[in-house]
Image (spheres, rainbow, N blue to C red):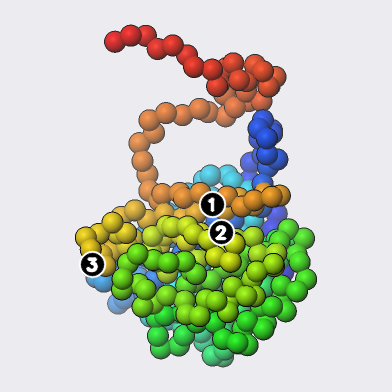
Amino acid sequence: MTGTTPTDGQNAAPPPAQMGQYRPASHLIAHLSDTHFLGTGPDGSGRLLYDAVDTDSTVHRAMAQLEASGLAIDALVFTGDIADRGEPDAYRRVRDIVEASAARMGAALVWVMGNHDERAAFRTELLRVEAHDGPVDRVIDVNGLRVISLDTSVPGYHHGEVTADQLAWLRDVLSEPAEHGSLLALHHPPVPTALPLMTILELRDQAALAEVLVGSDVRAILGGHLHHATTGLFAGIPVSVAAATCYTIDAAAPPRQLTGVGGGQSINLVHVYADQVVHSNVPLGAFDVVTRFDPAYLDRMEALSPTDRLAAFSRHVAQPAG
């Protein structure tokens, strides 16, 4: 259940100089969720989800955007529903896309079980370990930041649960604090949802999980399952849910409807600072640039004194009338 994955950020640009109140983040995590890959069709390409959604394209796009960013990403965390039907070839296809990208970025890779996943194939194809049907609970050390993946899946069902044995294991893991604290990654987020049908599929008996987490070093909870980005608070710990890469649930759909749309896909960036964790939503896709400050401009700002920076970048500049 425990592993250590060193990272080196080999393709990352150097961090900018500190110009504000906060020192740079100690860790940067890319949080993705709900890829829902299907197995390959007769032509060798991935089958379309609902005969409409090309799940591969958005994962390729997410990896390309992360690589092109030059950010020093320490780990990629995928919070469940990696394969829509648990097909081994679906796992192999998403694995090959993501592992290659993670290697180029020098990032650790954390896979989390979801309700659409199958534990045996998840283990053999994603984790490359022996198959068995027990919960896939793991600990990954990312340069002193402990990432705990907790399997909330219930075989044969879509709602979430955590067993007494899992809670005992989690309590034991958390009995010793990690150097930079812990992130808990699970599929079913312990936050309310305003979508009536999704309440049936929520994580059950959340109070028992809260008892284990209160007073621990868990600094943030990363979730998926809802197919739209949202945030909340659980046991005093911030919860951040990443939207799906495959399709998005419309949280503003008409009452009593559960509607998935083919747009709005996004991922989250998780910046871990000494005293807080910040989650930022990043849309997937190519968009028109309407304004831009290039690296040379940042170089000039870094070279100025704090007073001159405020005058150059913060002070309002009068615009000509008309």
In this rendering, the label closer to the viewer, 3 or 1: 3
Residue 9 is left or right of residue 37, and the answer is right
Asked whether residue 266 appears in the rendered view, the answer is yes
- Residue 185 lies, in percent from the top left, at 57, 68
Residue under label 1, please give it. Answer: 279
First of labels 2, 3 by sequence position: 2
Asked whether residue 104 appears in the rendered view, the answer is no
Label 2, label 1: how many angstroms apart (C-alpha)?
10 Å
Residue under label 2, please give it. Answer: 238
CB within 8 Å, label 2 to label 1: yes
Between 176 and 35, the residue placed more toward the observer is: 176
Identified at 59% across, 56% down, the residue is: 29
Classify the position of the C terminus by image quarter.
top left
Identified at 67% across, 73% down, the residue is: 139
Between 258 and 284, the residue placed more toward the observer is: 258
Q: Is residue 196 above or below residue 156?
A: above
CB within 8 Å, label 3 to label 1: no
- Looking at the rendered structure, the kind of residue marked 2 is Pro
Q: Which mark is residue 28?
A: none
Identified at 57% across, 17% down, the residue is: 312
Classify the position of the N terminus by image quarter.
bottom right
**Secondary structure under badge 2?**
strand
Local packing at callout 1 (Cα closer than 10 Å; few below 14, some 14-19, many 20+) is: many
- Looking at the rendered structure, the kind of residue marked 1 is His
Residue under label 3, please give it. Answer: 257
Badge count: 3
